[in-house]
Amino acid sequence: MVKKNACIFISGKGSNLKNLILRSRDYSFPVSIKLVISDQKKALGLLHAKKNSIPYVIIDTNSRNYENKIIKDLKKHNIYLICLAGYMKILSKKFLKNYGKKIINIHPSLLPKFKGLNTFSRIMKNKEKKTGCTVHYVNEKLDNGKVISQRFFFIESDDDEEKLKIKTQKLEYFVFPESIIKIFRNF
Ligand code: GRF
């Protein structure tokens, strides 16, 4: 099977990156991870790139036109799919327009509910009955693009923010690869 090249953007722990690297080793998985981009030089997730000999680039988001540098790196590695996995910077409209290929994001809630940050505390405060995660296409509005895949679980009475996070991430490790397979199903 001819795989398309993917790039994973991270800012932190990179547990989704680790999981996607593992899954991408399956013969039938549609993408191969060829590049990791981080806006944080100390992001723990970079270790997964290093361990697996995947090229990585640390972006200085304070430098002017840093998105042009990202585009150059993406072109160099012939990247077809960008997966935002805990990447904390907003991509500009110009970037989204210029890149023109597929960009997807994983968000720890059942979108359109709880867009943005501090999801778990807001979910608890709101006394939600269920929660989960969503993978969606990225557009100019925050956590707003077309949904690709979504899964939920019921919140139990002894769940707190930390437990919700653990349960949500467990689901993410299933939903992110599933979404990538879905995108390429009719390719
Ligand atoms: C994930 O929970 C994702 O939903 C959110 O950021 C978190 C990243 O976690 N967008 P990790 O860095 O993949 O461990």
Image (cartoon, rainbow, N blue to C red):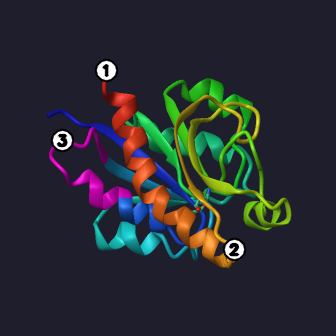
Q: Earlier in the sequence, mark 2 or mark 1?
A: 2
Distance between the Cα atoms at labels 3 and 2? 40 Å
Compared with 7, 55 (above or below) is below
Circle 1 SS class: loop
- Quadrant containing the C terminus is top left
Q: Earlier in the sequence, mark 1 or mark 3?
A: 3
Ligand number 1: quarter of image: bottom right
Circle 2 SS class: loop
Q: Tell me the kind of residue under disc 2.
A: Ser
Q: Tell me the kind of residue under disc 1.
A: Asn
- The residue at which mark 1 appears reads as 186
Q: Tell me the kind of residue under disc 3.
A: Ser
**Neighbourhood count class around disc 2 (C-alpha, 10 Å): few under 14, some 14–19, many 20 upward:** few
Of discs 3 and 2, which sits in the foreground? 2
Q: Nearer the viewer, residue 156 or 131?
A: 156
Please report the bounds of the magenta region as a residue range: 20-32
